[in-house]
Amino acid sequence: MQIQQEVSLMIARDMKDRRVGFVTVTGVRLTPDLRHARIFISLMGSEGEKEESLEALNHATGWVRHELGQRIRMKFLPEIVFQMDTSHEYGAHIDRLIDETHEH
């Protein structure tokens, strides 16, 4: 999806906020009317660093939205919310549970 690629590039190349650590954009979910976008991210670091990065990203949503408007032609510029993608952690938890059942 083009939004995912553009936001990834913005964070990696253009974002100046030092609170934002190593971030991977893992997905984008748009509402059917294209007015709201939930951008899922994976963060590296301690829990405190992750929270700080997420807070900085959500603080920068106006800038991200403006930049998207410059880079992508869309009928509407969606309101943006960043959210941590916990699917990897959930998958690792399920793997541990499966391993535990095989041990017994």
Image (tube, helix red, strand yellow):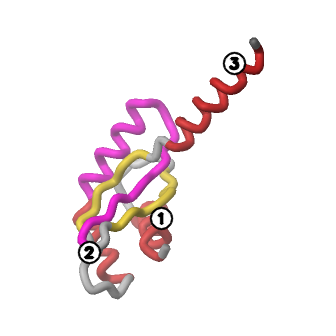
Say whether disc 3 or disc 1 marks the residue closer to the N-terminus: 1
Q: Residues within 10 Å of mark 1 (few under 14, many from 20)?
A: some
Q: Who is closer to the viewer here, 41 or 28? A: 28
As for residue 42 lying within the magenta part, the answer is: yes
Say whether disc 2 or disc 3 marks the residue closer to the N-terminus: 2
As for residue 36 lying within the magenta part, the answer is: yes
Would you say the residues marked 3 and 1 are in contact, meaning their CB atoms lie under 8 Å apart? no
Q: Residues within 10 Å of mark 2 (few under 14, many from 20)?
A: few
Magenta span of residues: 35-60
Residue pointed to by mark 2: 33
* Amino acid type of the residue tagged 2 in the rendering: Asp
Q: Secondary structure at mark 2?
A: loop
Disc 2 from disc 3: Cα separation: 44 Å
Q: Residues within 10 Å of mark 3 (few under 14, many from 20)?
A: few
Q: Position of residue 54 (x, y in %)?
A: 35, 45
Residue 61 sits in quarter: bottom left
Q: Who is closer to the viewer here, 100 or 87? A: 100
Q: Secondary structure at mark 1?
A: helix
For the point 50% across and 36% down, the residue is: 45
Residue pointed to by mark 1: 8
Residue 64 is left or right of residue 50, and the answer is left
For the point 45% across and 72% down, the residue is: 6
Residue pointed to by mark 3: 100
Residue 97 sits in quarter: top right
For the point 54% across and 36% down, the residue is: 89
| Count of marks, rendered view | 3
* Amino acid type of the residue tagged 1 in the rendering: Ser
Q: Position of residue 37 (x, y in %)?
A: 32, 64
Disc 3 from disc 1: Cα separation: 37 Å
* Amino acid type of the residue tagged 3 in the rendering: Glu
Q: Position of residue 72 (x, y in %)?
A: 37, 83
